[in-house]
Amino acid sequence: MRTRTLLCGLCFAAGTAWVLPLHADEPIIPPSVTRISPAGMERGSTATFTVEGRNLSDAKAVTFDVAGVSGKVTEITDVPEKITGPRAGEDLAAQVPLGKKQTAKLEVTAAKDVPPGIHHFRIQTPLGTSDMVVLDIGALTEIPASHAMAAGTDVQPQQAKLPATFVGTIASPGDKDSYQFEGKAGEDVVFQVEASRLRSLLQSKLVLSDMSGHVLAEAGTYDEGPDAELHYKLPQDGPYLLSITDREQSGSPDHFYRVDAGVLPYVTGVFPLGVRAGQTAEVSVQGVNLGAVRQVKVEAPKSANGWATIPLEIRNGETASLNTVKLAVGNEPEILEKEPNSAVMQAQDISLPVTINGHIAGGVDAGRKPDEDYFRFHAKKGERLSIDVAAARLGSPLDSVIEVLDAQGNPIPRATIRCLNQTTTTLADRDSRTTGIRLVSTSGLREGDYLMVGDELNRVKFIPDQPDADTILEGMEGRRLAYAGTSPDVHAVNTPVYKAQILPADAEFPPNGLPVFHLTWRNDDGGPGYGADSKLDFVAPADGDYLLHLKDVRGMEGPDFAYRLTVRDATPDYQLSADPANPNIPRGGSLPVTVSISQIRDYEGPIEVEGKGLPSGVTAKPAVIPSGQKTTVVVVSAASDGSLDTQPAPIEFVGHANVDGHDLMRIANADADGAPSLQLVSIIPPPDVVVTTELKEVSIEPGKEVTVTLHVERQNGFKGRVPCSVENLPPGIEVVNVGLNGVLVTEAQTSRTFTLRAEDWVKPIEQPIYVVGQVESNSPTMHASAPVLLKVASTNETASASPAQAASPNR
């Protein structure tokens, strides 16, 4: 399924969105939270927070994601705003109403036994639940940073007694906060920054020094992540200084931090990185201040569904480790890597299925090149195997790359990429994540075509009908997808881009003057959900022995470069996401929830989706993600007599896939621990608009167009414009001839006609589509029409595949 947005995106940043006065005819705007200060608290206490946001009045409840934490809003203060209009020629974004700007005093009580760490909450008002707010609940005494006693004077280090949590803000560029503490010779002091997960902009740098200014240790300067961690054995008794700053010398009120500090248990590594389901295992741990703990017994759950993890409890007496460690849980037999296996002739023999626990380490110490591991396995022709690395996802510094070789160690051809025409990138460089790419020309391209961009194979999702817009490539979870084992990469301006035809590895064809790419069975980054970990879906070309080769793509190694390498029969699996995660449903109205495939593997069939846990008066229409599509729309509705006093209820969007007669069930927005966090549904006042269509059924033929008329009924005194979109369109169906403003029902209109066009290659299908009206604001509400059944007729042309799609990419 694809969605065509019919109005340019709205921007609410300062200077580009404008406050409109709120009158009786302004829309219903659900509450929103932009900031909470401070960013955390000590458990076993009650703390007062300042919450900044909009439309927080009459807050009824505060819902947390963990037992033992409660909160109440004790005070609401309106914040005056200057009402201004857009500057001519400068502020070109749409004017939208904003909810009343307010601050709230929030009193939170956390029990002494609440698990320390990151927690979340939402605020409920009569207008719905807010977006999710992050809060850190710690176990240590909190010490705020010191400030200058007077303007122009130096800031003195804050005196601190460890253990403690240092709390502060790098408020201006170049600022530095310092904390002085007493230490003893031989103590391993640990400092761990918590900032990015609290939505701070800080990229922290820590410096530990003695009182003479001599630097003993530092962390963060070259870290890939934004949050620095440092541990160091003190050389002597006496005072020491810990300083924190932004590594980029930036600073603002949004550069806040919390630093846990002390002689505390801290885990630097575990091995193996996981355990087999249904078994009890011993896991080795390394770290500081762990006392006599060297092994930890782990009892794994009876089974593992997809990617699953469990927390590893590590304690030194009554004190838990400062950092959180998770272990993977798998269903396959587990073995250890055996050295030497750093060359083709030394490959370790393995039987499938298997999970291999190993390290990339020891090569340089032995006077060789950095370590790399080889494994030998047998496969039959056509046998499909899933090969996965789990390392970076479990905290290992390994950045893996894997490849399958023949028995002599030679790369195995996977596919031939024939280039059909050429264009280039333009306007700006693109990173390895973004799905938008600006092309000099889109002539000859259509949705579903494959593109070879550098060494990366992508697929076209959307081609704009105007030159000054990006072509959109397929992606998941906001990240660009790469196919056939290739990995997303950075692309500079003027990078050649080729329309690609995927052919068998041994295909022959006449030359056309364009490059030919030969892909082998190799992968660096596995895509969404994998991070730096690799994955391959290997299909054996013949009976025989094969080699599996694993190394660090940067040529690095170390004793902490641990990995889990799993090889098993290809098993269908998928993961789902749902948006919004907190549906605020108007009484008597309907809201569309987009359910998307965030990961999928070895499954090409439909996925049925249903809503579960709905409160009284709320219903959800079941939906289907058809084969070959990635999203669907679940329409959630509230009865006209639904109670506004109904408490927000946990809701789940559950997918069902039929795999060999078995129901493969997955819950949207579930993490590796299994459950979505604070996914709540609420009933709010009746909708500001009701969207209907004249037709309940639309038929269209490939290459043809059809018009649809929509109607908008405004309610509650609302008089604003209503931009509309058409949701759940199948591939090859587009809304056309809409101009820059899209399908926009102006303030003076109550209806609008739009045109659907079917590409000549579109496949026959019957699928519900929805017209969705948006009531604009800083927290917009979406209002879905009743379903319109779209019927795409069958023709001989639709039965043939595009030349660019003649072979499966076997992603």
Image (cartoon, helix red, strand yellow):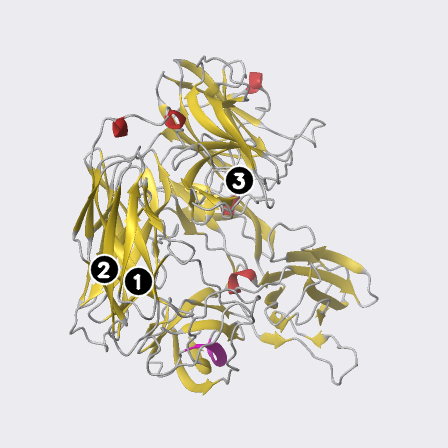
Q: Which residues are magenta?
A: 44-54
CA gap between label 2 and label 1 equals: 8 Å
Q: Looking at the picture, how far across and down is residue 8, in whole percent? A: 44, 58
Quick one: label 1, few (<14), some, or many (20+) residues within 10 Å?
Answer: many
Q: 682 or 649, which is in the foreground?
A: 682
Instruction: Identify the mark at residue 785; answer none if there is no mark.
Output: 2
Is residue 421 visible to the viewer in this orientation of the structure? Answer: yes
Name the side, left or right, on which 248 lies relative to 71: right
Q: Is residue 730 above or below residue 171?
A: above
Q: Is residue 21 above or below residue 351?
A: below
Amino acid type at image mark 2? Ser
Amino acid type at image mark 3? Leu
Q: 512 or 806, which is in the foreground?
A: 512
Return the residue at label 3.
439
Quick one: label 3, few (<14), some, or many (20+) residues within 10 Å?
Answer: many
Q: Looking at the picture, how far across and down is residue 515, in whole percent? A: 55, 22
